[in-house]
Image: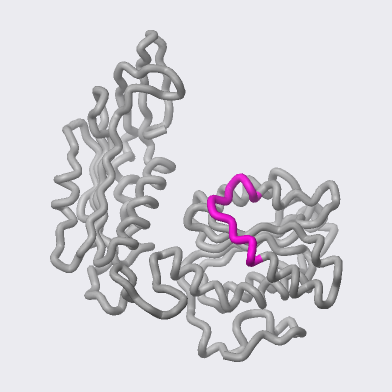
Amino acid sequence: MREMPARRTDADCTAREDPGAAPLLRGRGLVLIASTRAADGTYEDRTGPLLETWLRERGLDPVERQVVPDGPAVGRALSAAIDAGADVVITSGGTGISPTDVTPEQTAPLIDREMPGVLEAVRRRGAEKTPTALLSRGLAGMAGRTLVVNLPGSRGGVKDGIAVLDPLLDHLLEQRDGGGHEDGTLTEGDRPMSADPSLGPAEERTRHASVGEGEIRTTDMAAAVADPRCGAVVTFDGVVRDHDEGRGVARLEYTAHPSAEQVLAEVAGEIAQRYPDVLIAVAHRVGPLAIGDSALVCAVAAAHRKQAFAACDELVDTVKQRVPIWKHQVFTDGTTEWVAALG
């Protein structure tokens, strides 16, 4: 594969120079433009179209573009995209040193694992043409399963960012999903999905999703996803603890909206769609629960362990975020509190 040229036209800034060698990606993308002037219509967004075209040509679908003012609006838009399960979020603008350039500050609290080398490479590339490129303060890293990258607000900075990111994007997302190693060696749990038999369509791979008052057990969920094609079963058991934020908990009760079971099934189906190599079973208990009782249990089976761990982690997080279930906690001092389930 040929290297990226130092100078590129707008038409070049879409994918790799050899389109036939650029793997098409799966997932959702967001281009987030941080510019107060572009947001109020006094300035044309000239970087968003470049990024949007590039991500679409790499296979991401859908790819949305949002323009927001500098400041807290950037953080809110980023947080919403991460919560919605975006795979890639590229921001442009707000990375300089003016008082309103706060995109890195809005990004930093959301990043779990920073990747400083990405923006270092972008800055070095830009500095070959414009020394002021070294002043860009953008960040890059993973926010859960979402790749977030802050690029400058200039067309040149965005082109440099595309040149750096394009050869990395497919490998980065593959590693996120438990793919192979840089030297091409595949170890246990790292075989390509195509080497394993299909587990069927997403609707058939959601084996169980229920909300009810009866006792729930991880053994039952594991039995629901048992399959001879799967060599890994990951379970989660969310139990009632005896404390919350420094206060002793005596007991609690879960209350569900009538739509809770439907939403739980939808969440399980979405995770199954995002992970085509897993089987899913999940149950949430409602009603009065004692300390040590199971409130949420789930099991995820896959041919290899990494896919099972990743899907189970995302399943639990998404259930917590979206399923309309609340808990009424009774503390040992006699006070009570309503909070979101599993909070």
Residue at x 35% of width, y 16% of height: 330
Residue 288 visible in this rendered orientation of the protein: no
Residue at x 19% of width, y 37% of height: 216
Locate residue 66, reporting x and y percent.
66, 58
* In this view, 94 is above or below 334: below
Q: Which stretch appears magenta?
A: 107-118
Q: Quadrant of the N terminus?
A: bottom right
Locate residue 339, reporting x and y percent.
43, 27
* Quadrant of residue 239 within the rendered picture: top left
* Quadrant of residue 165 within the rendered picture: bottom right
* In this view, 41 is above or below 338: below
Locate residue 242, reporting x and y percent.
33, 22
For residue 108: magenta? Answer: yes
Locate residue 281, reporting x and y percent.
23, 51
Residue at x 57% of width, y 51% of height: 111
* Quadrant of residue 124 within the rendered picture: bottom right
Front residue (pair 238, 92): 238
Q: Quadrant of the C terminus?
A: top left
For residue 18: magenta? Answer: no
* In this view, 314 is above or below 185: above
Residue 256 visible in this rendered orientation of the protein: yes
**Figure disc tally:** 0
Name the colouring of the figure.
one colour
* In this view, 256 is above or below 310: above
Residue at x 34% of width, y 33% of height: 257
Horizontally, residue 95 falls left or right of residue 219, namely right
